[in-house]
Image: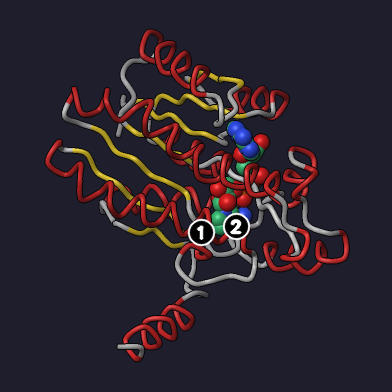
């Protein structure tokens, strides 16, 4: 990894920052993209060498400009982490097109935009590695419809992409975290209030996430998963019994 270049969306905080720290320790040159500028500045203060970009993953022009800029300053991107995300929520009776659009634009199209920006450059160089952040909620149905829809799509996209790009020497993993101790609930509220978790649901979800590993441990798990070129990267085994039930139910349905 030493000397390679990584581009991490949602890299200013949370899991993205954990990945950046783990890569930084291994001598990887870092490009962090995020919508939160103060958080980007804090991350840049602790990591070097690093380039930061105020980038909304919905903005395709900003992605292209950032890719050009990173190539000029750090070199071609070897490792792409499509990690930025929110935890949108809505009661099913209160769903609107506006909520669907926000949820899918950030959590799914944001991943597609990262791939569409960097993959042609990787194919041309016949080298590269892509890690998309989904969730265990992309493997086992979760009552959070907005979240599960996008995360199942990110898992499917990643598995299919892996099949397509192996011939170009490019690897793909999908990161499927269980609970990780980050501020995603509060961050979603400040970024996208219209799809924020209702107040009465926050304490239980926050407590659930706080029971998971911290971002530095997760960053190490991600690097280990990339080194193994693992199709799926997990952060705990909470989902295992649910996956077993799902697989059994699927097979039972034949
Ligand atoms: N924390 C968990 O328990 C957990 C579990 C499963 C999956 N995930 C996934 O992990 C990823 C990272 O989440 P986290 O827990 O580290 O959250 P986080 O809020 O700590 O970090 C996410 C980062 O993404 C940024 N971001 C949000 N919307 C953006 C946009 N439109 N453009 C660019 N940047 C944007 C935020 O500013 C933030 O810095 C997300 O995709 C999330 O769905 C998290």
Residue 192, image x, y percentages = 74, 41
Image coordinates of residue 49 in percent, x first then y, are 47, 19
Above or below for 124 versus 104: above
Q: Nearer the viewer, residue 202 or 3?
A: 202
User: In which quadrant of the rendered view does residue 213 lie?
Assistant: bottom right
Quarter of the view holding residue 113: top left
Instruction: Please tell me which residue is depicted at 31% across the width and 24% down the height of the picture.
Output: 3
Dot 1 and dot 2 residues touching (CB under 8 Å): yes
User: At 51% from the left edge and 59% from the top edge, which residue is drawn?
Assistant: 135
Residue 228, image x and y in percent? 26, 54
Q: Please give the name of the residue rendered at 83% of the width and 59% of the height, measured from the top-left corner.
A: 198
Nearer the N terminus, badge 1 or badge 2? 1
Between circles 1 and 2, the one closer to the viewer is: 2
- The residue wearing badge 2 is 147
Q: Quadrant of residue 165?
A: top left
- Seen in the picture, residue 38 relative to 137 is either above or below; the reply is above
Q: Which residue is mark 1?
A: 135
Determine whether the residue tagged by mark 1 lies in a helix, strand or loop.
loop
Q: Is residue 65 above or below residue 184?
A: above
The N terminus, quarter of image:
top left
Q: List the single residue furthest toward the bottom.
A: 252
Q: Disc 1 and disc 2: Cα gap in Å?
A: 9 Å
* Residue 78 appears in the figure: yes
């Amino acid at each position: 990894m030493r000397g390679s270049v990584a581009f991490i969306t949602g890299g200013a905080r949370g899991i993205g920052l954990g990945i950046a720290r783990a890569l930084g320790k291994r001598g990887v040159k870092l490009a962090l993209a995020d919508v939160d500028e103060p958080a980007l500045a804090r991350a840049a203060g602790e990591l070097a060498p690093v380039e930061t970009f105020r980038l909304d993953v919905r903005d395709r022009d900003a992605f292209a400009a950032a890719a050009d800029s990173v190539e000029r300053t750090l070199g071609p991107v070897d490792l792409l982490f499509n990690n930025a995300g929110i935890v949108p929520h809505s009661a099913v009776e209160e769903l609107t097109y506006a909520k669907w659009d926000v949820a899918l634009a950030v959590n799914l199209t944001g991943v597609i935009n990262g791939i569409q920006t960097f993959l042609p450059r990787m194919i041309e160089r016949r080298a590269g590695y892509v890690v998309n952040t989904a969730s265990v909620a992309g493997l086992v149905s979760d009552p959070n419809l907005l979240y599960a829809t996008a995360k199942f799509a990110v898992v499917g996209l990643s598995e299919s992409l892996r099949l397509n790009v192996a011939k170009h020497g490019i690897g793909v993993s999908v990161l499927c975290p269980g609970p990780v101790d980050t501020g995603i609930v509060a961050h979603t509220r400040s970024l996208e209030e219209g799809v924020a978790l209702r107040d009465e649901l926050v304490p239980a979800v926050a407590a659930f996430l706080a029971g998971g590993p911290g971002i530095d441990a997760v960053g190490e798990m991600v690097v280990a998963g990339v080194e193994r070129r693992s199709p799926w990267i997990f952060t705990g085994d909470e989902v295992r019994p649910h996956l077993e039930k799902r697989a059994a139910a699927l097979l039972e349905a034949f």
